[in-house]
């Protein structure tokens, strides 16, 4: 089948969509990812067996907070529709609700099928720290409400979000495809210690992911201040990166390093050079409450014990597979205690590492991709 996958980003570090597109291409489908162009990026390129088209939006530079989001989206939808006129697909795969209207228009034009891949719980998002206007906050989940009953299949990233979508919209149970890494052998690494000149006597606790509010990065950094033999490392980019780096430069957060974003291909080697993985999603909204961050699986694949939040999906995995400690992400003392409990007993620490690697045999893309291929086999009949 010809498949068009829509994203409303530049498609630089979208690991989930990359895995889905490459999996479908390897299975014999013709796959095109439709993304947004940014200076320095190719407008049309091939990677891992699929094609990437990046759309040039003339309204991209507009900065009017009230009108420009609507104008930019209308232009995006029009360009997707125009592309669909001469690049026909049999399935349009909408990643996140913000691509649903454009995907539906394109699917309608070509009498194609429509798949909705819900990466977040749109009705449960928190916008307390964002700059978008109140009207857009209220309208954010509207595309999902309008179009979710017009799709052929729904995919999502956790069982809790799947159940919530059923409760809200009375749809059939979505296919849960976890955002897991591919199962690869990750060799031992000292990359973080070498790059940051960390002493062998010090342990490395690692957070990787977006640097945004509600991820527990502040409380994690504060927790490090009370643990003498542990440093904290943060990998990733986001709106708070500059402010957090300044805290380190001013001496507020000693022993904490903000490295910024690293290439996806290099990330496993950084992860493998840590001693503990950090997942401190704060329970600030339903979207966070039901989330299952892919960083948790990345830590398991690297054999890292995990300090994790007491939110349902994270708690279930940590308890069931005995791979770490559960803490209060709002409390630096609780986080510090969790880190120290993992490190206090070397035998227990090694058992947790072994359990993490066993869990990785279950939570991997090789297993999750089978669900995606079954879904597309069903669509083709």
Image: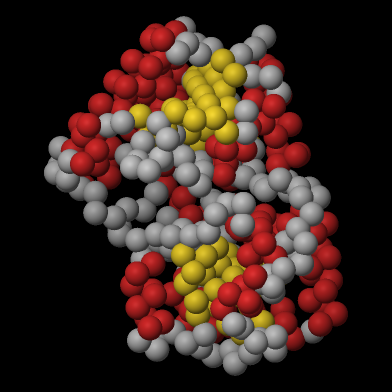
The image position of residue 205, as x and y in percent, is 61, 75
Rendering quarter of residue 7: top left
Instruction: Answer above or below: position of 267 versus 331.
Output: above
Instruction: Answer above or below: position of 216 versus 97.
Output: below
In percent of the image, x 74 and y 86: which residue is there? 344
Rendering quarter of residue 229: bottom right
In percent of the image, x 50 and y 36: which residue is there? 118
Q: Quadrant of the N terminus?
A: top right
The image position of residue 181, as x and y in percent, is 67, 48
Toward the viewer: 46 or 276? 46
Would residue 5 appear left or right of 299 to someone viewing this image? left
**Viewer can see residue 160:** yes
In percent of the image, x 21 and y 34: which residue is there? 59
Q: Quadrant of the C terminus?
A: top right
Would residue 377 appear left or right of 66 to someone viewing this image? right
Would residue 248 appear left or right of 205 to someone viewing this image? left
The image position of residue 224, as x and y in percent, is 54, 84
Toward the viewer: 12 or 342? 12
The image position of residue 335, as x and y in percent, is 57, 78
In percent of the image, x 70 and y 31: which residue is there? 371
- Its colouring scheme is secondary structure
Instruction: Answer above or below: position of 307 versus 150.
Output: below
- Callout count: 0
**Viewer can see residue 320:** no
């Amino acid at each position: 089948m010809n498949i068009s996958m829509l994203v409303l980003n530049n498609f630089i570090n979208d690991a989930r969509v990359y895995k889905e597109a490459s999996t479908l291409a390897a299975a014999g489908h013709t796959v095109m990812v439709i993304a947004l162009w940014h200076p320095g990026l190719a407008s049309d390129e091939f990677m891992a067996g699929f094609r990437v088209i990046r759309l040039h939006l003339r309204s991209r530079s507009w900065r009017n907070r009230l009108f420009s989001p609507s104008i930019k989206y209308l232009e995006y939808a029009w360009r997707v529709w125009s592309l669909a006129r001469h690049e026909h697909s049999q399935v349009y795969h909408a990643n996140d609700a913000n691509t649903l209207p454009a995907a539906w228009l394109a699917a309608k034009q070509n009498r194609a099928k429509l798949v909705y891949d819900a990466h977040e719980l749109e009705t449960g998002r928190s916008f307390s720290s964002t700059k978008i206007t109140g009207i857009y906050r209220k309208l954010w989940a509207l595309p999902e409400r309008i179009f979710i009953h017009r799709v052929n299949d729904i995919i999502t990233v956790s069982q809790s979000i799947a159940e919530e979508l059923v409760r809200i919209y009375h749809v059939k149970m979505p296919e849960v495809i976890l955002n897991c890494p591919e199962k690869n052998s990750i060799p031992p690494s000292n990359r973080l210690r070498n790059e940051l000149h960390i002493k062998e006597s010090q342990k490395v606790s690692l957070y990787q992911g977006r640097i945004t509010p509600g991820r527990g990065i502040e409380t994690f950094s504060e927790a490090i201040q009370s643990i003498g033999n542990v440093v904290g490392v943060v990998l990733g980019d986001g709106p708070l990166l500059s402010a957090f780096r300044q805290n380190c430069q001013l001496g507020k957060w000693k022993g904490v390093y903000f490295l910024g974003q690293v290439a996806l291909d290099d990330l496993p080697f950084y992860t493998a050079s840590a001693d503990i993985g950090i997942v401190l999603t704060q329970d600030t909204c339903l979207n966070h409450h039901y989330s299952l961050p892919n960083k948790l699986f990345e830590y398991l694949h690297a054999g890292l014990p995990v300090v994790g939040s007491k939110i349902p999906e994270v708690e279930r995995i940590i308890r069931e597979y005995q791979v770490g400690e559960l803490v209060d992400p709002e409390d630096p003392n609780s986080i510090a205690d969790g880190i120290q409990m993992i490190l206090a007993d070397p035998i227990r620490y090694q058992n947790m590492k072994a359990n993490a690697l066993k869990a990785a045999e279950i939570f991997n893309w090789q297993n999750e991709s089978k669900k995606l291929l079954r879904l597309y086999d069903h669509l083709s009949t």
